[in-house]
Amino acid sequence: MPLYRLKDYYPDYRETLVDGQMDKISSYSVYTEGDDKVGTAKDLLVDDSGHFRYLVVDTGPWIFGKNVLLPIGLAKFDYNQTRVYVDGLTKSQVEHLPEYNDDMVVDDTYENNVRSVYQPIAKGRSTRQFMGNTYTVTNGQSEVLAGDLRRMPPLGNTATIADPTREGDLRRMGPIGESARPTAAHPSIYDQETGYYGLSEEDNHGPLRSYEERLRARRQGS
């Protein structure tokens, strides 16, 4: 799924505010465990459905001066102090994150590399109640719904078609093509990976979600 910079997807994002808390994302500093500063927020990346997916972090002089991506669900916002905290993150982990450049295409391989660094933190969020989420979360991941290829059993005698309710039955797979776009029945990887991208009240994501909803409504109404 393609990703877009906030200003490219929502050119009027500064005119659609939530109590003036998100008008300038670059005003937020990013802190790791132990209150160590590792950079400043530079941008937000949005998917083609208009949902926030990553915070772009400029590590500046703290860590080699590279830009890295932080899955939005792992960012705990302190709106009053214009800070973002990432519980459990260390400078060493930030150093091992792949570099992000504004003109690059974020593909599946790149995102998998990003998620692998944050995996211990994402697993720690498995007990969260995610806003608007209807999936069961286990070990930092939402339970994959019926039809996901990763749930298919090996081909052979174990893949009997006698029971249409059996997990992995080919008759439960949706058609491939346009109808395979993310829907409630077939969510995107971002909706499945709630440990990384799920927004929760516990992490003070209420204003962020409200801002996202207002931006989406404004774009759809334009």
Image (cartoon, rainbow, N blue to C red):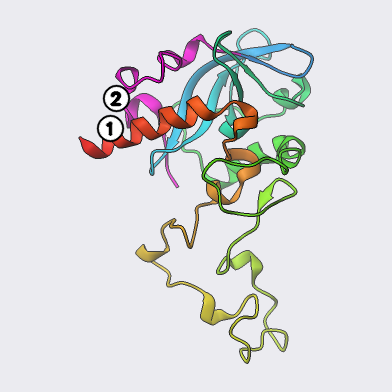
- Taking the spot 57% from the left edge, 68% from the top edge, the residue there is 146
Q: Residues within 10 Å of mark 2 (few under 14, many from 20)?
A: few
Left or right of residue 100: residue 94: right
Query: Would residue 56 be seen by someone viewing this image from the given angle?
Result: yes
In the rendered image, the quadrant that contains the C terminus is top left
> Circle 2 — which element?
loop
- Depicted 192 relative to depicted 177: above or below: above
- Taking the spot 42% from the left edge, 72% from the top edge, the residue there is 175
- Depicted 3 relative to depicted 183: above or below: above
Position of residue 63 measured from the top left corner of the image (x, y, whole percent): 68, 14
Left or right of residue 156: residue 7: left
Depth check: 45 or 107 in front?
45
The residue indicated by pointer 2 is 11
Quadrant of the rendered image containing residue 95 = top right
Q: CA distance from mark 1 to mark 2?
A: 11 Å
> Of label 1 and label 2, which has the lower sequence position?
2
- The amino acid on which the numbered mark 2 sits, given as a three-letter code, is Pro
Residue farthest left in this picture: 222
- Taking the spot 60% from the left edge, 35% from the top edge, the residue there is 200
Position of residue 6 measured from the top left corner of the image (x, y, whole percent): 39, 27
Query: Was residue 120 drawn as part of the magenta stretch in this picture?
Result: no
Q: Nearer the viewer, mark 1 or mark 2?
A: 1
- Taking the spot 63% from the left edge, 92% from the top edge, the residue there is 162
Quadrant of the rendered image containing residue 21 = top left
- Depicted 163 relative to depicted 198: above or below: below
User: Which numbered circle lies on residue 218?
Assistant: 1
> Circle 1 — which element?
helix
Position of residue 206 measured from the top left corner of the image (x, y, whole percent): 52, 29
User: Which numbered circle lies on residue 81?
Assistant: none
Quadrant of the rendered image containing residue 126 = top right
- The amino acid on which the numbered mark 1 sits, given as a three-letter code, is Arg
